[in-house]
Amino acid sequence: MSEAQRYGVAHVLEMKDAVPHQEALGLQRAADVLLLLLWNDPRERGVYTGKLFEYLGARRPILGIGPADNVAADLIRERQAGMVSADPDEIAGQLIRWLDAKECGGIPDLPASVAAGLSREEQTRQLERFLMQIAGNPSVYRHNERIP
């Protein structure tokens, strides 16, 4: 018996097979809310997942479930892109607010500013500028030693 059946929610779930990346991005964009599961592991506190950046690009609210003391949670809060919690009551309260919004006309898109500067293209341009600055600077550091 599946967990969904055991808890009586199987009738509200839809399981999908794997889809191509572009289709997955479209599904994210069409979602009411996007779920991001955060690892409860101290080694993961400094890890951003690629999925988080896709979610920000989709401009849909993010429900992060897990510890709130990591860089992914910080980014969600800083960008006002949703909420992160491990507290069932807080999560339930937020889900109720989103359901109420959906019934009153829909959950609005997040502003474009949530993803500003975070696309692969924008990040690549920033990296390129950084590398060009270092390449043109005679005081480049390598392995914590100054190269003359």
Image: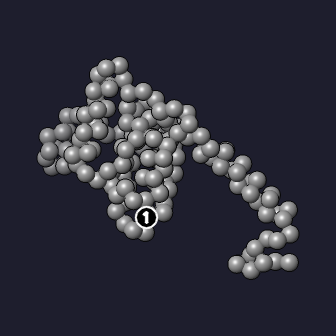
Residue 111 vertical placement versus 3 (above, below): above
Q: Position of residue 83 (x, y in %)?
A: 37, 44
Instruction: Name the residue nearer the viewer: 145 or 22.
Output: 145
Label 1 Cα crowd, 10 Å radius (few <14 / some 14-19 / many 20+): some
Horizontal side of residue 119 vs 17, given as left or right:
right
Horizontal side of residue 144 vs 114, given as left or right:
right
Q: Position of residue 52 (x, y in %)?
A: 48, 48
Q: Position of residue 55 (x, y in %)?
A: 47, 42
Horizontal side of residue 9 vs 124, given as left or right:
left
Residue at (65%, 49%) from the top-left corner?
A: 123
Residue at (49%, 54%) from the top-left corner?
A: 49
Q: How many marks?
A: 1
| Residue 31, visible in the rendered structure | yes
Residue 16 vertical placement versus 71 (above, below): above
**Secondary structure type for disc 1:** helix
Question: Residue type at mark 1?
Answer: Glu
Residue at (47%, 57%) from the top-left corner?
A: 71
Horizontal side of residue 79 vs 62, given as left or right:
right
How is colour applied across the structure in the image? one colour
Q: Position of residue 131 (x, y in %)?
A: 76, 59
- Of all residues, the one furthest to the bottom in this rendering is 145
Which quadrant does the C terminus fall into? bottom right
| Residue 13, visible in the rendered structure | no
Residue at (48%, 47%) from the top-left corner?
A: 78
Residue 73 vertical placement versus 143 (above, below): above
Residue marked by disc 1: 44
Which corner quadrant of the image does residue 102 belong to?
Answer: top left
